[in-house]
Image: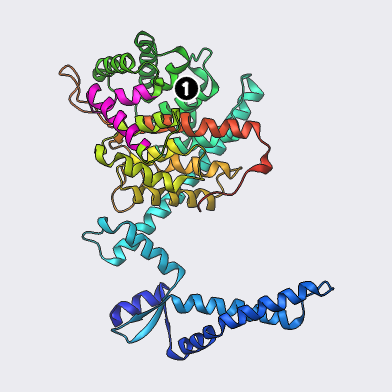
């Protein structure tokens, strides 16, 4: 880097200059590191064999010196020679973060200088914090409203804090007045004839219907008409709410085409879960091609050693219904799976959801981690177990450098080619499929776990 560039990055704290005497001192000290380590090891053994509660002062001093030399070795190994200015520089922690950002988003840098890149990433990450704050406001409003209903009129099973945060994160994505969102959500949740459907179905359906940017009465009418129609297409009563919610953003001109594809998929794969059938049915492929992609994804995952029955069916269905080229499906899945193992149990559905993202897999993982960081820093959770599942909802549709796609075309819910009788304007995917998959394959297992385990067993988040 030139002298001018050096001045900028040093001023921003991304690198720091290391003068020659300091480097020489580190080099001389590190030369004694191995001998000091062996001496500390020998004295530690002697101290353990000697009665007494405290280590000898000499040993304590040598341990402190060893720690200092270890830090110096780490700094020495990190030094980089800068030819234009004839000096060594050390990349700081902040600088390493910038390097990681540049490596992740290098394909999106066209037309931007370094300052613009940093500014846009800073704006994006500040927007994530704003989104969590908005979800927190909705969470407080929903909680207060639930308490008021319990006191005044409503006698059904109340939502838990985990339920409210799940709904709040979905609602926060819709940029309208929070009070209106709370009113619409409670209208859907409490004034819709749900019959005997489960609280989980009511929760996700109410959140999804509220997230749609249309008149609530029309949205509910559309949802109920789809739910009623599904009984004539082999969807069992317990699955109708969740499947109807995943199709709630479709215009009426598409219904017949989707329903016919549901019939065909169920005829050919009668054992397949109804939600996975609907994912394949609303994909942009003919049934034969969609099922071919499904089988190809299964065989590709099996070749990589992923063999877990129903979990592989889930992942294969989500992958097959996306617009990702078939030859890239399994590799993208393997990459995202390697990055979310330990964050989810089981991790296959979340990995498939991230793999179907319009972003590159490494970009999708980076956004997911940014969301985990935002949820964690803003303490938008009670149990650490919630952090990743809230971040997964949050990660849908957000990305820096103009690559965000919320309100655009969600790949696994891509717009079908409408028949001639349909309206000309295609309705884009608005997150309905993503939120339903999250509810069914991520939120519900976590909810069951929380309900059956004491709080003290929960561990820290995988990222953040």
Quick check: 81 above or below 380? below
Taking the view exactly as shown, the residue that stands out farthest to the left is: 420
Check the picture and name the quadrant holding the N terminus.
Answer: bottom left
> Image quadrant of residue 110?
bottom left
Quick check: 113 above or below 219? below
Quick check: 228 above or below 55? above
Residue 175 showing in the rendered view: no
- Horizontal placement of 316 versus 144: left or right? left
Q: In percent of the image, x 37 and y 15: which residue is there?
A: 270
- Horizontal placement of 407 versus 58: left or right? left
Q: Which of 200 and 224 is in front in this view?
A: 200
- Residue 277 shown in magenta: yes
Q: Nearer the viewer, residue 85 or 226?
A: 85
Q: Give the color scheme: rainbow, by chain, secondary structure or one colour.
A: rainbow
Q: In percent of the image, x 43 and y 48: which residue is there?
A: 339
- Residue 428 shown in magenta: no
Residue wearing tag 1: 188
Q: In percent of the image, x 39 and y 10: which residue is there?
A: 231
Q: In percent of the image, x 40 and y 18: which residue is there?
A: 271
* Residue bounds of the magenta highlight: 276-302
Taking the view exactly as shown, the residue that stands out farthest to the right is: 51
Q: Residue 58 placed where, x, y %?
A: 73, 83
């Amino acid at each position: 880097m030139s002298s001018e560039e050096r001045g900028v990055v040093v001023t921003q704290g991304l690198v720091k200059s290391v003068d020659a005497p300091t480097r020489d001192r580190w080099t001389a000290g590190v030369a004694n590191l191995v001998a000091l380590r062996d001496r500390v090891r020998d004295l530690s053994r002697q101290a353990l064999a000697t009665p007494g509660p405290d280590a000898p002062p000499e040993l304590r001093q040598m341990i402190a010196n060893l720690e200092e030399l270890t830090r110096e070795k780490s700094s020495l190994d990190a030094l980089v020679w800068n030819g234009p200015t004839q000096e060594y520089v050390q990349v700081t922690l902040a600088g390493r973060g910038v390097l990681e950002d540049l490596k992740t988003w290098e394909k999106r840098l066209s037309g931007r200088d370094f300052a613009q890149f940093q500014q846009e990433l800073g704006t994006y990450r500040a927007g994530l914090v704003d989104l969590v704050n908005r979800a927190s406001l909705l969470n407080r409003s929903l909680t207060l409203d639930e308490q008021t209903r319990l006191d005044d009129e409503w006698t059904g099973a109340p939502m838990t804090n985990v339920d409210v945060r799940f709904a709040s994160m979905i609602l926060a994505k819709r940029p309208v007045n929070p009070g209106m969102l709370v009113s619409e959500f409670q209208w859907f949740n409490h004034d819709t004839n749900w019959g005997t459907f489960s609280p989980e179905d009511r929760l996700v359906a109410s959140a999804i219907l509220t997230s749609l940017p249309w008149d609530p009465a029309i949205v509910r009418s559309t949802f109920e008409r789809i739910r009623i129609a599904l009984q004539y297409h082999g969807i069992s009563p317990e699955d109708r709410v969740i499947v109807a919610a995943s199709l709630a953003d479709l215009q009426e001109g598409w219904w017949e085409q989707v329903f016919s594809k549901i019939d065909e998929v169920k005829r050919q794969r009668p054992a397949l879960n109804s939600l996975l059938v609907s994912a394949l049915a609303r994909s942009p492929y003919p049934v034969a091609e969609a099922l071919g992609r499904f089988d190809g994804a299964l065989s590709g995952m099996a070749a990589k050693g992923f063999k877990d029955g129903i979990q592989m069916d889930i992942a294969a269905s989500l992958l097959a219904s996306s617009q990702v080229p078939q030859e890239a499906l399994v590799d993208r899945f393997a990459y995202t799976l390697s990055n979310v193992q330990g964050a989810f149990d089981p991790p296959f559905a979340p990995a498939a959801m991230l793999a179907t993202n319009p972003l590159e897999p490494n970009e999708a993982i980076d956004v997911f981690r940014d969301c985990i960081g935002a949820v964690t820093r803003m303490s938008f959770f009670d149990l650490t177990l919630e952090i990743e599942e809230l971040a997964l909802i949050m990660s849908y549709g957000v990305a820096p450098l103009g690559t965000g796609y919320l309100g655009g075309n969600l790949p696994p819910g891509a717009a079908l080619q409408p028949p001639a009788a349909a309206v000309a304007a295609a309705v884009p995917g608005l997150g309905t499929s993503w939120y339903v998959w999250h509810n069914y394959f991520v939120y519900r297992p976590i909810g069951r776990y929380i309900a059956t385990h004491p709080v003290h067993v929960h561990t820290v988040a995988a990222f953040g």
